[in-house]
Image (cartoon, helix red, strand yellow):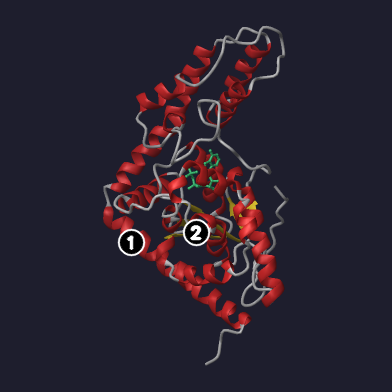
Amino acid sequence: MSETTINPSTTDNQLPSNIVMSGIRPTGMVHLGNYFGAIRNYVSMQDDFECYFMIADLHSLTTHPDTKTLKENVRRVLAENIACGLDPNKATFYCQSHVYETGELYLYLNMLAYKGELEKTVTFKDKARQHPENVNAGLLTYPVLQTADIIMHRASLVPVGKDQEQHLEMARNFVVRFNHRYGDIFPEPHAFNYNKSLVKVPGLDGSGKMSKSENNMSTLYFADDDETIRKKVMKAKTDSGPTAPNTPKPDYIDNIFMLMQLVCEPDVISKFEADYNNCNIRYGDLKKQLAEDMVKFMAPIRQKTNDILANDQYLVDVMKKGAEQASKSAVKTMKLVRDAMGLNYL
Ligand code: ADP
């Protein structure tokens, strides 16, 4: 990830430099990967920056065309983010489909995106492989829509996990092309993480990443009850342990230690590191400890989510306020865009 320099904000037509934007799809329940890759950063950034956080309901249509569960999923993801610490009074928290200007900016950006580069996107190739029956144009142009979302607020800091790195690179390309052709309207967006490097939370099976849409048994969801969390952690892939001191860890063991880094106390991790290096590690004990620390971390968030979900009027109010604030910003940006493009004949 490139270093991101944070400068004081600017106003009016100058390029703003410290606006934050990110999104999460309502394609399922929020999980540990979303938290450590993205939401944890949202929560830290909302005190220091102008932040826009979005439920990416339109993005979800590229892979989940059935909208029957969308309403419920949108509410759940809203509630889970708020339970994780996102504060709708500090950040603008809204649904993508409530900002109508997005479709317009997406259209303009599509003229600056080339078929060849879109086809090369790793996420497109993965999704096309997984769902050969639904390789739609929306899926192909996913990075274009994502760019429209980000630059709609002229944001430059994008808190995301490592899986989004390539999309951010494409967003920068589209921005550079737009600015080159029509004038400097947009700052270049960069992936942002407080800990310098971007995070990828691995799946418990030792392969891939935790994910909302796939990999159910390998992903820890905030909606999981305590027993399910314990069961999933205890099933994580291990082996009979190293036979020589200081052996490099295989990927799946490294992943478990990485999960410990997220929720366990440093002295607990040091003890198991030493056990590993001395060839007397007991993975059963390690997983029990990890499971308990996970439960301690995740259970209060689940409880809070349920409390928020029980108050539907609150969620409706959050969505309305978010839509109003996000639309205001979008209207302002689109005026700049149309003027820059010469689409102002009246
Ligand atoms: P998912 O892949 O679970 O459907 P989204 O595509 O909605 O999640 O992504 C929401 C945010 O969560 C993005 O910033 C993405 O980078 C981050 N994210 C998703 N999975 C992980 C993971 N396993 N590790 C780190 N960050 C992740």
Q: Which residue is mark 1?
A: 317
Direction from residue 63 to residue 41 in the image, left or right: right
Q: Is mark 1 within 8 Å of ligand 1?
A: no
What is the three-letter code of the residue carrying label 1? Asp
| Label 1 – label 2 distance at C-alpha | 34 Å
Q: Which residue is mark 2?
A: 137
Q: Is mark 2 within 8 Å of ligand 1?
A: no
- Where residue 273 appears, as percent x and y from the top left, is 64, 17
Q: Quadrant of residue 206?
A: top right
Q: Is residue 22 visible?
A: no
> Tag 1's secondary structure?
helix
Residue at image position (57%, 52%) is 45
Direction from residue 300 to residue 337 in the image, left or right: right
Residue at image position (45%, 38%) is 31
Pick whichever, 69 or 271, lies toward us: 69
Determine crowd level at label 2: few under 14, some 14-19, many 20+ residues with C-alpha closer than 10 A: few
Question: Is residue 139 positioned above or below 260 on the image?
Answer: below
Can you name the residue that lies furthest to the front here?
Answer: 133
What is the three-letter code of the residue carrying label 2? Ala
Mark nearest the camera among 1 and 2 is: 2
Residue at image position (33%, 54%) is 67
Q: Quadrant of residue 296?
A: top left
> Tag 2's secondary structure?
helix
- Where residue 321 appears, as percent x and y from the top left, is 39, 65
- Where residue 240 appears, as percent x and y from the top left, is 57, 9
- Where residue 242 appears, as percent x and y from the top left, is 65, 10
Q: How many marks?
A: 2
Pick whichever, 171 or 47, lies toward us: 171
Q: Is residue 122 visible?
A: yes
Residue at image position (35%, 47%) is 76
Can you name the residue that lies furthest to the bottom here?
Answer: 346
